[in-house]
Amino acid sequence: MLGKEEILKKNVLLDLRKKRKDQSRFDRAKNRSFLFSIVLGLLIIGIIYFISPVSDIYRIAVRGTRYLKEEDIIAFSGLSTKDKFLLVWPGIYEKKIATDPLIESAKITKKYGRLIDIEVKEKKMLAYLRSNEGYFVLLEDNDQLNTERYPYVIGHVPYLDGFDEEEIGLITKHLRDCDQGTIDEISEIRPYPDLKYQNVELVMRDGNYIFTSVYGLPILNHYHDIKSSYVKDTQICYYFEDISGNAYSSACPWEEVETVEEITEIDDEDEE
């Protein structure tokens, strides 16, 4: 049998173990309470942050547009300054913007200061057409897009008038080789049947005229170099040769007609 001292020691050991277990449970409970307090505090802070304007997008910037307005790009994206900056997933909104037929690609970047940066690349626009159904923009892939959604774009590209579908296809093919900036300088493209080989007339926004064939349209990329070779006193007519690639300035076709009529009238007077 155990003696009194051994029994006492055993009871002391049991008490110590119990106290340690109780202390361990207390410490664990205290740690859980501490962690819960931290989580709860973070949750409250998060809720306050998200319901306050501080979490909203501060500004949406758009880059890369040539024709489309910034507000249209933002509308295509579906973003607004009321949206939460942290909840913006760029890939989702990039796809939304790229669904517009005038947009080739879009990239969204989230920047410091709650700034959303949208960079877009527009499709190349060659001209616009008019039909009974309205105005259509001619794109480089030969698609014709109704401009009802953005009517203002037709003010930047030339008006194509008087050509049949086959001719429009040829013009599209050769305008693709022209720089977008050069295309923007053309006001109107129309047939000029009075000239056999240079039967396409281009009315430039600077008041000059160009006569060439469909195949000579890529020479337009050198328009500024050609124009700088001549002193501009009045309207100037330029002629582009598609085979040789040469360009020169001469009297406008209607001026030559007027000169012939004047000479004819003078001859008639002399005969009288």
Image (spheres, grey):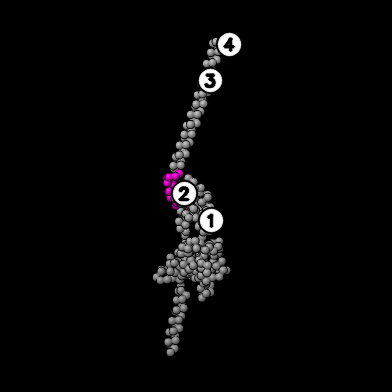
- Helix, strand or loop at label 2? It is loop
In the picture of the structure, the residue carrying the numbered disc 4 is 2
- The alpha-carbon separation of the residues under discs 1 and 4 comes to 89 Å
User: Of tags 4 and 2, which is closer to the observer?
Assistant: 4
* Amino acid marked by disc 4: Leu
Q: Is residue 180 above or below residue 84?
A: below
In the picture of the structure, the residue carrying the numbered disc 3 is 17
In the picture of the structure, the residue carrying the numbered disc 1 is 99
Q: x, y (%) of residue 112?
A: 44, 45
Q: Earlier in the sequence, mark 3 or mark 1?
A: 3
- Helix, strand or loop at label 3? It is helix
Name the mark on residue 272: none
In the picture of the structure, the residue carrying the numbered disc 2 is 83
* Residue interval drawn in magenta: 50-61
Cβ–Cβ below 8 Å for labels 3 and 1? no
User: Of tags 3 and 1, which is closer to the observer?
Assistant: 3
* Amino acid marked by disc 2: Asp
